[in-house]
Image: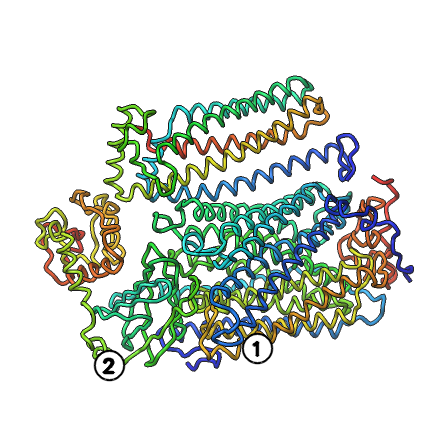
Amino acid sequence: MHRTGELYGQFKTLEQQKDTATLGMWIFLVTEVMFFGGIMLAYTLNRHVYFHAFAAGSNTLSLQLGGFNTVVLLASSFTMAMAVWSAQTGKKQLISVFLTLTILLGFVFFGVKYVEYGQKFHHHLVPGKSFDIFYCVDNPTKCEDVSAEELTTEREELEKARAADPDLNAHAQLYYSAYFGMTGLHALHMVIGAGLLLWLLKNSLAGLYSPRWNTPVDMVGLYWHFVDIVWIYLFPLLYLIDRHK
Amino acid sequence: MQPLPFFPVEASNFAGNVDSLFTFILLTCLFFAVTVTLLVIFAAFKYKRKGVGEVGSTVEGNTPMEIGWTLLPLLLAIGMFAWGAVIYVNFRTPPKDTLDIYVIGKQWMWKLQQPNGRKEINELHVPINRNIKLILGSEDVIHDFYVPAFRVKMDVVPGRYNTLWFQPTKIGKYHFFCSQYCGTNHAIMGGWVTVMDPAEYAAWLSDEGGDVNPVSAGEKLFTQLACATCHIANGTGRAPSLNGVFAAKVLLADGSTVTADESYIRESILQPKAKIVAGYQPVMPTFQGLVTEEQVQNLTAYIKSLQGQPVPTKGSGIAPAAAGKK
Amino acid sequence: MRAEPHYPEKNYLNETYGIRSWLLTTDHKRIGLLYLASVTFFFFIGGFFAMLIRLHLMTPSGYILTPDTYNRMFTMHGVAMIFFFLIPSIPAVLGNFLIPLMIGAKDLAFPKINLLSWYVYVVGAAFTLYSMVNGGLDTGWTFYTPLSTVYSNSAVAPAVVGIFITGFSSILTGLNFLVTIHTMRAPGMSWFRLPLFVWTHYATAVVMILGTPVVAITLALAGMERLFGLGFFNPAMGGDPILFQHLFWFYSHPAVYIMILPSMGVISELIPTFARKKLFGYSFVAAASLAIAVIGFLVWTHHMFLTGQSTYAALAFSFLTFLVAVPSAVKVFNWTATLFGGSISFDTPMLYAFGFLGLFLIGGLTGLFLGCLGTDIHIHDTYFVVAHFHYIMVGGAVMGYLGGLHFWWPKMVGRMYPEWLARAAAIILFVGFNLTFFPQFILGYLGMPRRYHTYPPEFQIYNVMSTAGASILAVGYLLPMIYLVWAAFYGKVAGDNPWPATGLEWLTTSPPPTENFHVTPEVTWEPYDFHNRPDLGLDVPAGKPGKLSPSPAHGDD
């Protein structure tokens, strides 16, 4: 369909075009809820049946890094909302500023994730043949990034968990299956989001977005907020199991 | 009831009822199918177009008819559901007095074990007019044990036990099939169920002496694996006495009770921390990976054989009210 | 009398030329034809596997295929037919072509996403074809674990990736339809003036949107289990094979409604058109379509009655399964009632509609035996199930697809197919179909399990009947493929509205121009209303004022 200015040929008015795009994005987000829902169900059932293994797994995650990433993503949702506001109020330069900030915060998130994933590989916590939840406790010299007193606490907790669940190692793999599956899927969605943001940035630097028409900024904003909300679920589900002690 | 020519022989307590239900649904479906078909054919003839430009009438609908033909199928559907539900609940609730046979399915054969330990491969011998319960386990993928003549079938799922019960009512030999696709030789993973006169069955059972009796095999394991060091019969050990525990209600540490059936015994051996008996410490080691499914079955058979043994007043896990009755 | 049929000089087929204009098109009509080519290709592939299966099963010991090859045949037959033919067929071919026309729009809401959906289908198909020729797939189209994730030696991973990708084609199509129907209707086209075809595609789109993502994550988890050793479905790691079944069937049951609802929509167009009478109980039929979509999400465990799950769960799901049968029955009664007082002709599309009524009746009713717990114990996983779902999917969905193809072929290509040959093919199909699949009900109750490469000799007679029927069925399918293509080039010019029918799509030329309508229609009439359409040139009884006249020109907006 040919395009006259911002209006695509199959639409009669810009308003119809915007309503259509908005409905489309919301429906797409519903499909994403169903998609993540499946793995969340698998997580929920397995956590219920193998609570000790899941608690043990969760306690190997860094609360500091996870918490930091949560703040980073919340901030990026704020900057994204500011970008949409800038577009709606005609502040064209600010759109690019806020989009850039959002992208930068996204990259900070990736950086932290890279560190966390690296730790997991190093500590033999990736599901597969070499998976061993006792690896650091049994080989303290190989896990220099964990302090001696952290290792002592960890050893105690793991022994307690193993007493309750003799198959702790096998069931802990299920926790890490959930961890890598859920955070991996989330990271993939963020990468796609980052790509969309770069595309928006290119267009906003060219001055394309205005109060009259800023639908793509709005739509990518919805998507970005959704990806943020998924993380808000993932953080307590994965990082905060049995942490009250 | 004489089955229709397209039915397999009726050879179990379920078969006649299932066939009757099938016939009821069939007649109901025939009623609707024939009625609609006749109506369609009738309309096709009566309202055949008579002129090139002819159009039909302006009738748009009829709400009472809509309500009627919504409610009538709904009522019939509920009737079918109810009848089927009764059969199914009966099928999923084995009676207490069953002759138990342990069945293992693996790619691509069946191993069956009679109560006295006699083993069969791809064959099942059972006496007529006894309640038979099959306890089904899998060593690899999902299988399914299906006897068309009995109208019974149950999936065999790795990681759990499923049970299937029936009462054979007709002497003869009947197919059984694996009926959940399980790989290359799924289609030849079957055999024959032979229903025999009880006297003949007893004779067959003791013929060749059979393999090691599962009860004595279980008893040997009980000592070998040091179960006896904690589960002392007179209740003075670190673990409850197992006299009389099978099929009784056990009182757990959290106040709930559970019936000590085959699944409970199996879980207690493989995941002992799952349910702790009231008044005892969670110190039992797991035997996951140390015993095969067959050994678990033998231990279960031995523990079952302790049902008649005297229950100590102190040192049994049985829930007080039930213990009193024993 | 109506004017001599006219073939428009410029239309969507010839407005632009060259392969790039087709592969980069965003015209929903061309995209419909692209899908027609790809689903037909997979129909051949699935049909080829079916032919080998039926040939092999003529004898109890099967001389044609080895067990491993046979197991690949039935698996790949299922995968090709379900994911690459049935699910896309009516929505992606007819739905894409017709929905904008039926609602008076110039295109779908998202034309570029529409093209993307076709490319996604093609990429998914490529992965699956790769799997088929590099080791094949022998897990059954249901991929039960741990057979598929641990024990199978076939090319499971590429197949699972392929189906995962193709699922997004379905999601994008459903999304496009939902949004289009909400926001792109022409002035006056209110919800209750929509053709039932549009209602059923709306219901189908809801199912596609909510269900497909679940099978996507399920297959992703199964694939990761196979490739990377995750353990959700592996009992050796504490996982649960039954969890896989729940997640799988949560989509795959609603998927069967994705396959049948569009076909029901076609029938709801054919019967009023060829009886020249309003559809009886329009709002009840529309409501029934939505009810099927909603209740269809609540019955999935009826595929799992014998897995050892809770008896209470079985009771609940059996009850719900009986509930979902009721709206389908209501539709059948309404279609039948539409015939009474009509003016019925026996053109080919109507023959397909009659065929659908008979075959869907049998298929739907036999579902009752399976939803009923007492009888399901006996017939679960036997040929009874195979017969039931083929009656619905082939007898129902494919008959609707062919009926629709014949009905709208003149609109799509501007020319008519040879009527007598087409009627003969429809009758051959009906006969061949029944001979192929009815004996399978008998086989099932006698106890023959499904997915068997060999069987006890007492089952042979019915297997031979089934194979004989399949050969007749094959002829019934080949004929339309040949004459429909022939007709596209050499058939008689059809004109705007050859039947005539009352939908908006018939108010434009055959074939339509790229922008669908030269003048945006304004709708003031009810659907299937032959009495208020003087423009159709029929013998409407005198005294009825005509309500339609093409609205004053809006200019080309």
Disc 1 marks which residue? C465
Using residue B78 as the reference point, say whether residue B93 is left or right of it: left
Of C296 and B172, nearer the camera is: B172
Of C302 and B117, nearer the camera is: B117
Q: Do discs 2 and 1 belong to a common subunit?
A: no
Rendered location of residue C217, percent (x, y)? 50, 45
Estimate the spatial distance between the alpha carbons at disc 2 and disc 1, rounded to whole Å: 42 Å
Q: Tell which subunit mark 2 falls on.
A: B
Looking at numbered disc 2 in the image, what kind of residue is underneath it? Answer: Glu
Secondary element at tag 2: helix
Secondary element at tag 1: helix
Q: Residues within 10 Å of mark 1 (few under 14, many from 20)?
A: some
Asked which quadrant contains residue A93, the reply is top right
Rendered location of residue A1, percent (x, y)? 77, 40
Disc 2 marks which residue? B200
Rendered location of residue C77, percent (x, y)? 56, 61
Looking at numbered disc 1 in the image, what kind of residue is underneath it? Answer: Met
Rendered location of residue B201, percent (x, y)? 24, 78
Could you tell me which residue is drawn at 80 percent across and 63 percent down? C487
Q: Tell which subunit mark 1 falls on.
A: C
Q: Is residue A45 above or below residue C152?
A: above
